[in-house]
Amino acid sequence: VALAAIGFLSNLATSLTIDVYGPICDNAGGIAEMAELESIVRDKTDALDAAGNTTAAIGKGFAIGSAALVSLALFGAFVTRVRHASGDALFANGVNILEPVAFAFLVVGGMIPYAFAAMTMKSVGKAAMEMVCEVQRQFDENPSLLDENPTERPDYDACIAISTNASLREMVPPGAMVLLTPLFTGLVFGVMAVSGLLVGSLVSSVQLAISMSNSGGAWDNAKKYIEKMPRDSELGGKGSTIHKAAVVGDTVGDPFKDTSGPALNIVMKLMAVLSLVFADTFYSINDGGGILNLHA
């Protein structure tokens, strides 16, 4: 399993190349729009950006696959560490997922990635709304910013501060959940519960990360496709009701593919690493039964 993870990572140069392609095209389109270049320039950058979303989804697939294999290897190391510490008293024949404690925490572990994704997406929406309010405040206090050739520069630093402060502040709750859940589970409920927790979070994180990466890119490309259509077409083009619905989808899709999806790779690995590091500590409490001594 570990060698398979190394094989995934051996394509790192290719993965990074196709991953970086999308943001470069997206930034080029933004610069073209702000510079008020001809519409044909924006049409070409939009086509390149749509291709970039597809290549980014492929690159994220490599990252998700390698993270899953690394997490699986770390989970195997955790089981082996506990088995050696217990003198083959625990996990001698592997993890029995039909054990009541293991199965119960399999369900709990499966819910962790969904809770994490919901918290991060809510944080993105909250920070975006703060930035919108700041931009509106600057327009209200200084209407000359809306002039064709404004004499004053907007306060860009205020908007940058909102995003950077929010990125640090809003990551505390989901980060604490990922860090504390395996520690609390191992100390209170024992190593059997931790094994179920890790399996549940691994399986759930993989499928959720793949789904988010692909669906986020698809929603973004759907919006771009509608914008290219003429106003008298079936889709109505830019400004139509269908386009407004696609914009709503893209508003959800951006944190899907850029925030929650990639962050789930860290959730997988971090929970497994913490469990492995504290494996001996978990076993030292009632021989792996935790404070509640559930296997007694």
Image: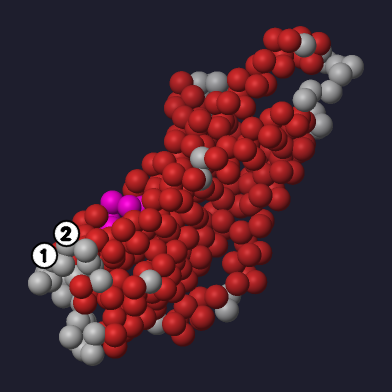
Image quadrant where residue 37 sits: top right
Per the image, is 60 magenta? no
Going 23% across and 90% down the picture, which residue do you hit? 87
Left or right? Give the position of 80 relative to 150: left
Residue pointed to by mark 1? 100
Give me the disc on residue 104: 2
x and y percentages locating residue 159 in the rendered image: 69, 30
Q: Secondary structure at mark 1?
A: helix
x and y percentages locating residue 169 in the rendered image: 55, 40
Going 29% across and 81% down the picture, which residue do you hit? 82
Give me the disc on residue 42: none
| 142 up-or-down from 68: above or below | above
* Quadrant of the frame with the N terminus: bottom left
Image quadrant where residue 127 sits: top right
Mark 1 Cα within 10 Å, few/some/many (few <14, many 20+)? few
| Dominant secondary structure, magenta | helix
Q: Are marks 2 and 1 in contact (CB under 8 Å)?
A: yes
Going 34% across and 61% down the picture, which residue do you hit? 182
Extreme-right residue of the structure:
151
x and y percentages locating residue 91 in the rendered image: 21, 82
What range is drawn magenta here?
Answer: 109-113
